[in-house]
Image: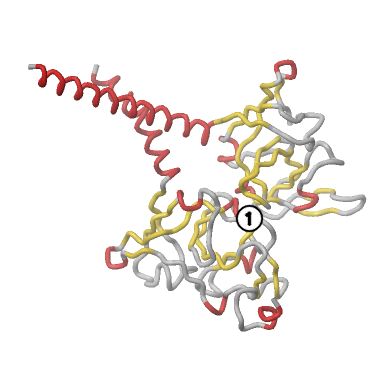
Amino acid sequence: MKIPNFFKSVFFGVPVGITIVDIIGYIARVDGISMQPALNPDRTQTDYVFLNRWATKGYEIKRGDIVSLISPKDPSQKIIKRIIGLEGDVIATLKYKSDIVRVPEGHCWIEGDHTGHSMDSNNFGPVSLGLITAKASCIVWPPNRWQFINSFLPESRAPLNLSSRSIIGIAY
Amino acid sequence: MGVYRNILLSQNAQRYFLGTVGTFIKYGCLAHCTFQFVGDFVLCSGPSMEPTIHSDDILLTEHITPWMGQIRHGDIIIAKCPSNPKQQICKRVIGLPGETVKVGFASYKSVPRGHVWLQGDNNSNSLDSRSYGPIPQGLIKSRAICKVWPIKSVSMLVS
């Protein structure tokens, strides 16, 4: 009688586990240098972040959030970037094919914090919101890096329609 | 004695209640996993896939092929709409990464890496890759296998 009980536990335990991971969130390792200095500031240790799936359920994301998304270039790869612009925003791009881009409906503009060392929207353009899988809400490992990740939009990268530094901003 | 029996009864009721909630959670999670990772039913609306699929047809779809990246030419897929992630679209895969698709009378477009070219079967009345370009493979949710409703049009969907 013991063994069938064990199988029964697995039969229900696995779906319960998967559902929790799928709905609430999970912990993932951050690879690469593209989000320095917010994530992986030190070469010698890698950060582990909690990816909050619940927060992106309704695709209600804000500028400055760090999100994980499926790479538009390779669906088997996940990337972690910062949201710079939402739909309708005007972005001054860096080394993209056009200098100024208006983010289309249902899309967002994402960038890594480490300008120039990141494969982001400056490379492949605006990405569809549907590719976003989760929001990075805190760093859980190593212990000396324990912290919540706050929404932060670098002043120099803010969309032109929000910042006052540009002529376009004043025109709005 | 009476008080003791009441406590016993309420403990039993509590246990029974927790047991019921537990059962709901277990089967709920099992259903969630099945619909999320194995297969589910989709109600289609709109004319874009006529004559293959009509409005209000119900399709049986599976999630395993897209998950393994085994999408092929001619498959009918359900994907998130690129301009509104809360909406889903049902289209046919016309072009895979690296291929060239004919978009106009004499204009061709190549499908970039990690993308697919989608088109509805109803060429004259379909909002598809011809208007919003190739869509990332990451947006594909599932592949349609067969029509299950209405009864008289039950059939497999072939590539």
Label 1 secondary element: strand
Looking at the image, which residue sits at the far right? B105
Q: Position of residue A65 (x, y in %)?
A: 49, 63
Looking at the figure, which quarter contains the N terminus of chain B? top left
Q: Position of residue B148 (x, y in %)?
A: 66, 22
Nearest the viewer among B13 and A93 is B13
* Disc 1 packing (10 Å; few <14; some 14–19; many ≥20): many
**In the image, A153: left or right of A150?**
right
Indicate whether B149 appears above or below A105: above
Residue depicted at 54% across the width and 66% down the height:
A63
Looking at the figure, which quarter contains the C terminus of chain B? top right
Nearest the viewer among A46 and B14 is B14
Looking at the image, which residue sits at the far front? B2
Looking at the image, which residue sits at the far left? B1
Q: Position of residue A56 (x, y in %)?
A: 50, 52
The answer to which quarter of the image holds residue A1 is: top left
Q: Position of residue A50 (x, y in %)?
A: 39, 55
Residue depicted at 84% across the width and 48% down the height:
B102
**In the image, B63: left or right of A102?**
left
The answer to which quarter of the image holds residue A166 is: bottom right
Indicate whether B8 appears above or below B48: above
**In the image, B65: left or right of B91?**
left
Nearest the viewer among A66 and A47 is A66
Indicate whether A9 appears above or below A131: above
The residue pinned by badge 1 equals: A128
Q: Tag 1: residue type?
A: Ser
Q: How many marks?
A: 1
Subunit bearing disc 1: A
Residue depicted at 69% across the width and 50% down the height:
B135
**Figure colour scheme:** secondary structure
**In the image, A121: left or right of A153?**
right
